[in-house]
Image (cartoon, grey):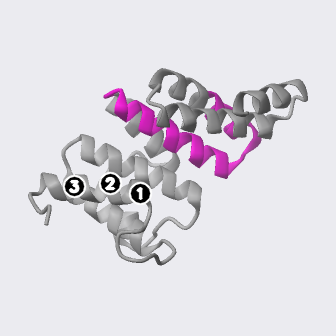
C-alpha cells in the first residue's frame, strides 16, 4: 500500500505526498530491519520535505534516517542529520540542554527525532543521557498506566537501565 501510494504521488507530481510516502517507506523498512532501503527512502523524504518546507516530514524522515544509520553503526551520519534538525548550531551540548531546560518534544514527529537521539546515545555508550531523554519523553507524553507507554521509549529505558546494572 505504501509503494502504491508513492506511485500515485509520483504520477500526480504531488511533492508532499511523495515526501510522506518515502517517509512511511523509510519507517517501514527500518522496522523490517532493511536498513539500506530505510536510508534510501528516508533520504528522499528528507530532500523532498526540505523542498516543500514541511517540518513534520523533515522531523519524521530525519528520525527514521538517523535510526536506520545507527543500526548500520554509522553514528557520524546519524549525529549529522539529528543535529541539523535539532539545532542550526553545531553544538551538541546546546541540543541536549534543550531537554534539561524542559523543552520537551510536543509532536509525534519531534518524539521520533528524540527517540533516535536516545538510540544514538545508547549506541555510543551514554546510558545516563538516554535516561535523561527518555524521562523527558515520558514526562511529555499522554499519561499511561505504569509500563504501558511507548514501547520504543520503554525499550530504550530498559536497555539503559541494564547497562547501568539497575535492571530491577
Does the stretch in magenta take in 70? yes
What segment carries the magenta color?
Answer: 44-73
The Cα atoms of the two marked residues, 2 and 1, are separated by 6 Å
* Label 3 sits on residue: 160
Q: Quadrant of residue 28?
A: top right
Horizontal side of residue 52 vs 32, given as left or right: right
The Cα atoms of the two marked residues, 2 and 3, are separated by 9 Å
Residue 35 drawn above or below residue 129:
above
* Label 2 sits on residue: 155
Residue extending furthest left? Answer: 165
Q: Nearer the viewer, residue 101 or 26?
A: 26
Residue 28 drawn above or below residue 167:
above
Question: Is tag 3's residue or tag 1's residue first in the polypeptide sequence?
Answer: 1
* Label 1 sits on residue: 151
Main SS, magenta region, reads helix
Q: Quadrant of the C terminus?
A: bottom left
Amino acid at each position: 500500500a505504501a509503494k502504491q501510494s508513492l506511485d500515485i504521488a509520483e504520477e500526480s507530481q504531488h511533492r508532499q505526498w511523495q515526501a510522506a510516502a518515502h517517509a512511511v517507506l523509510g519507517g517501514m523498512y527500518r522496522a523490517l530491519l532493511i536498513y539500506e532501503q530505510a536510508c534510501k527512502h528516508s533520504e528522499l523524504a528528507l530532500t523532498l520535505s526540505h523542498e516543500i518546507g514541511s517540518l513534520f516530514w523533515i522531523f519524521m524522515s530525519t528520525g527514521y534516517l538517523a535510526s536506520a544509520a545507527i543500526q548500520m553503526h554509522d553514528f557520524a551520519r546519524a549525529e549529522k542529520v539529528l543535529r541539523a534538525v535539532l539545532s542550526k548550531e553545531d553544538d551538541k551540548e546546546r541540543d541536549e540542554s534543550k531537554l534539561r531546560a524542559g523543552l520537551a518534544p510536543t509532536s509525534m514527529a519531534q518524539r521520533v527525532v528524540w527517540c533516535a537521539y536516545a538510540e544514538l546515545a545508547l549506541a555510543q555508550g551514554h546510558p545516563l543521557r538516554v535516561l535523561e531523554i527518555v524521562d523527558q519523553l515520558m514526562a511529555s507524553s499522554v499519561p499511561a498506566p505504569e509500563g504501558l507507554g511507548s514501547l520504543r521509549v520503554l525499550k530504550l529505558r530498559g536497555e539503559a537501565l541494564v547497562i547501568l546494572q539497575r535492571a530491577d
